[in-house]
Amino acid sequence: MAEIAIKQVAKRFGGFTALHSIDLTIADQEFMVLLGASGCGKTTLLRIVAGLETPSQGEVWIGGRRVDHLPPRDRGIAMVFQNYAVFPHLTVFENIAFGLRMKKLPQQEVERRVTRTAELMHIEQLLKRYSGQLSGGQRQRVAVARALAMEPDVILMDEPLSNLDALLRLEMRAELKGVLAASKTTTIYVTHDQVEAMSLADRIAVMHQGRIVQAASPVEVYRNPAARFVGSFIGNPPMNCIPATKTGNGSWTVAGLTLPGPKSDKHRIEFAIRPEDVDAGDEGLHATVRVVEPLGPHTLVTCDVEGGLFRAILESSAAIAVGDHLRLAPKADRIRWFDPETTNAL
Amino acid sequence: MHGKALPYLLLMPATLFLCVFFLYPFALVAFEAFTRDGGFTLDNFRTMTGNWKFPVAFWNTILLAAIVVPIQLVMALLMATVVSRLETGRGAALYIFAIPLGISDLAAGLIWLAIFDQSGFLNTLLSNLGLVDRPVMFLGYQSKLTIFVAVVLAEIWRATAIMMVILVAGIGLIPREYHEAAEVFGASPWKRFVKITLPLLRPSLQTAIILRVILAFEVFAVVAALGGTNFPVLMGETYNWQFSLQDRNVAAAFALLILAISVGLTLFFLRVLRVPKEARI
Ligand SMILES: Nc1ncnc2c1ncn2[C@@H]1O[C@H](COP(=O)(O)OP(=O)(O)OP(=O)(O)O)[C@@H](O)[C@H]1O
Ligand SMILES: [Mg+2]
């Protein structure tokens, strides 16, 4: 049982605050992905959990034990580094066995675990090689095998797939998911790739400028972004945001369409909708088509709405040409509203 | 064709320089060592080894190297590790440790002479503390051991920094991730040093040891200042034969012997501390 609790953790580097008071609880055996743009503090948070960085304030608990004063080796964790950190002077076998030897496990047990994890990661034929004789993908497998061999409560991964080519990434992603689910460990996985995050995570914690903006299941994060940043960061193309003007109590006008919305004393708020959640019809937002991109299964249409860009994913059967005027009807249950000042969902 | 020849062309000046200023004098010395009065002979080597001072000088030199180099290696490793860990003041620490490097070996010998001399600092200190009644002869002809200890101290003081500088550079080349990975996978600081730092530092260790061993066999000025003729070493004997005994041929034989030892040990350390190509960083 290894629940991870991060309580009010902050990290300052000199005058720069990399993390502002982070609170996050990760359930036992949960796969948590930290997702965010470069420089938002994902690695810093992961390193604090690992014990490679000390928090400026706050507590880290793993499996009901406060660990922020413990060295990494006493935290029951294993880690996969971004550049793999496969020791160049040791064979693959000794790399995987490294942690086991440090634990002084009997040779028989070491061999059993190395063989088992090597088979799991399909590198059993590479055990005698050195890191310099491996491809990037193979090195990555060794790094994962080394972590799995520890049979840790918690595995931490910092962008483990970012150095692989697209195809290998897809393959490793699926494999990792299976292997980690079977190993019953709690996982924190750092990435800036939203597709990776969506496909792997039980829950995604979206980070922005040293804060966690939202921590929820992939579908929830996608469908119900807690802030404008989440809506625009996740989803490709991103969520559309256009201004809405108050026309009554709980009634708003958006690009010529009047919609029921949240009750607010603000005059203008933001209306947001995913590109795939609109239909072309007789009623809806007034839009002028700028670019049409047929993508096969559907067509991506970029329009002008209220003087701003608006992307819609429409059925490819619809005959649409540049310059056409469209009425785009949003699906009522997919509409989100944001406060323009705090950018939070209303 | 042009592209292939270019690197060699660029190496030409350096190669020429080496031939003129190294190989040629070397050939001259070798020639002198093996000739006397115009004919080929091994007499110079017989004279060299036959002299009663030769075994003393030979074993003194070896003993000195065998004691100084390991001590220096351990100290340099320790200092380099500490310096590499510093977050602030690293440059200053490196600079301070490296100060003895800027002092010539004769000056270093003289500094330590000023300490151990009959009227030196150590004697002054001891008599001021009332520990001795009259000055002690630390470096007299009967006290071979104290001379040896003084030379060892002076050598360590003088030339540890050169190993340290090489090792600091080497440690800096090891990516931090390896240490962190070892830390996460359960290695204590000592284990990290033994299992990660030392093996990955092998190329730098090799350079540092070879350089230091060669220097150790050329030890001369420090010994001359502290021991004079009471503590013969190979290089001192070379000097002796060349200038006091005016026999260039035997001096050349000594020079060749020192060269042979240096080359032999260099090859030995190149072999022992070799890093296989596939296991490099
Ligand atoms: N040792 C340090 N000293 C000073 N600033 C640092 C240090 N480490 C990280 N930072 C800063 O903290 C912020 C967060 O860094 P972090 O490495 O956690 O980002 P990240 O989210 O992992 O980004 P990436 O996706 O590029 O890896 C960055 O702005 C970075 O410049
Ligand atoms: Mg990072």
Image (tube, coloured by chain):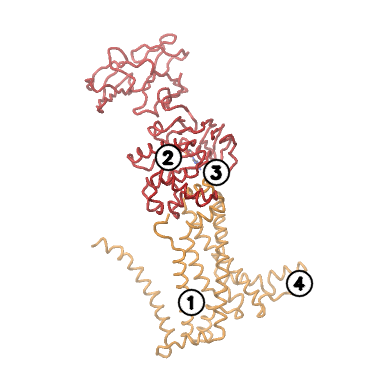
Chain colours: A red, B orange
Q: Specify the amino acid type for callout 4.
A: Val
What residue sits 50% from the left and 42% below the top? A151
Q: Specify the amino acid type for callout 1.
A: Ile
Distance Cα–Cα, label 3 vs label 1: 51 Å
Distance Cα–Cα, label 2 vs label 4: 70 Å
Nearer the observer: mark 2 or 4; the answer is 2
For residue A72, the mark is 3
Q: Specify the amino acid type for callout 3.
A: Pro
Q: Specify the amino acid type for callout 2.
A: Glu
Residue A18: percent from the left, percent from the top? 51, 36
Q: Mark 2 lies on which chain?
A: A
Q: Mark 4 or 1 closer to N-term?
A: 4
Q: What element carries label 4?
A: loop
Q: What element carries label 2?
A: loop
Q: Quick check: do tags 2 and 4 share a chain?
A: no
Q: Is mark 3 on a helix, strand or loop?
A: helix
For residue B258, the mark is 1
Nearer the observer: mark 4 or 1; the answer is 1
What residue sits 45% from the left and 40% below the top? A158
**Residue carrying label 2:** A159
Out of B28 and B110, give the one closest to the viewer: B28
Nearer the observer: mark 3 or 4; the answer is 3
Ligand 2 lies in quarter: top left
Q: Mark 4 lies on which chain?
A: B
Q: Please say if B74 is above or below A66.
A: below
Q: Quick check: do tags 2 and 3 share a chain?
A: yes
Can you tell me whether the CB of the residue at mark 2 lies under 8 Å from the nearest atom of ligand 2? yes
Q: What element carries label 1?
A: helix
**Residue carrying label 4:** B132
- Image quarter of the N terminus of chain A: top right
Distance Cα–Cα, label 1 vs label 2: 55 Å
